[in-house]
Image (tube, rainbow, N blue to C red):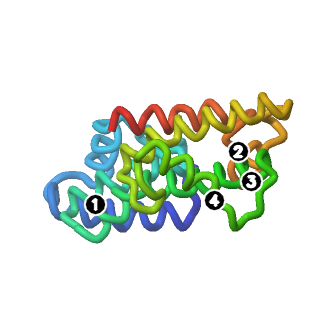
Amino acid sequence: MLSMQQRKSFMSLCGRAWRNVAPGTSFDEWRTSELVSIGLPASTKVMDHVWDYERAMLHLAQLADDYGQMTYWGNCAKRRLEWVFRGFRADLEYLRGVAPSTDYLEELLERSRLGEAGQLTREDMRSACAMVDSEIRRLASLAGVDLDRLPTAGRPWCFRGAKAARFRAFIDGMAAA
C-alpha cells in the first residue's frame, strides 16, 4: 500500500498524464486501465510501495512528457543498486575485518575490469552484484559465518533471510528491463 505522500504524488502525476493523453475520458477508468496495462494492480491500495510505485511513476512521467520526472524515476533502479553496493561494502568489511577506509569492493571491481562503483552503468552494476555476492558467500563459507549474521541480513538492507527472494526478484528484473 502506498503512503499518503506517495498517493498524493501519484495522483498529481497521474492527473498531469491524463490531461496530456486522454483528457476526454473518465479519469478513474483511464488510471485503472493504465495501471493494468503495465502489469500493476488496478488499485493503489494493493500496489507495492517500492517497485510497483516506481514503475507506475515512470510510466506516468512518460505519459505526462515530464523529462525531469522521467529522469528521476528512470534512475531508481540505479540508485537502488548503489544502495545495494553500500550493503555489500558492509558485508565485506564484516567478513574481511578491514577498516572502513579500505575499500575491498573497489578492488573486486577493478579485478573484474568493470570499473569504479560510482561509474558503472546499470547493466554493469547488475553483473557486479552477482560477482560481489558470490565473493561474499565464498568468504562467509570460508570464515564459517552464517549468511544470516551478515549486516545485509538486517535493517536497513534485508538482502538475506525473509526478504532475500524479493531482492533476487529485483536483480532478476534488472536483466529483463
Which residue corresponds to the image point at 39% horizontal and 62% vertical from the top-left?
Answer: 11
Q: Rounded to the nearest whole Å, what is the CA distance between mark 2 and mark 3?
A: 17 Å
- Going from the N terminus, do you reach mark 2 or mark 3 first? 3
Which residue position is annotated with label 4?
103
Q: Position of residue 50 (x, y in %)?
A: 53, 50
Element type at marker 2? loop
Q: CA distance from mark 4 to mark 3?
A: 8 Å
Pointers 1 and 3 in contact (C-beta within 8 Å): no
- Amino acid found under the numbered disc labelled 1: Ala
- Check contact, mark 4 vs mark 2: CB within 8 A: no
User: Which residue is disc 2 drawn over?
Assistant: 158
Give the foreground label among 4 and 1: 4
Image quadrant where residue 70 sits: bottom left
Q: Secondary structure at mark 4?
A: loop
What is the spatial separation of the Cα atoms under label 1 and label 3, in whole angstroms?
39 Å
Mark 3, residue position = 93
Residue marked by disc 1: 61
In the image, residue 77 above or below residue 168: below
Which residue is rendered at x = 63% and y = 36% of the image?
135
Of 55 and 150, nearer the camera is 150
Q: Amino acid at mark 4?
A: Asp
- Do callouts 4 and 1 mark residues in contact (Cβ within 8 Å)? no
* Viewer-side label of 1, 2: 2
Left or right position of 83 against 55: right
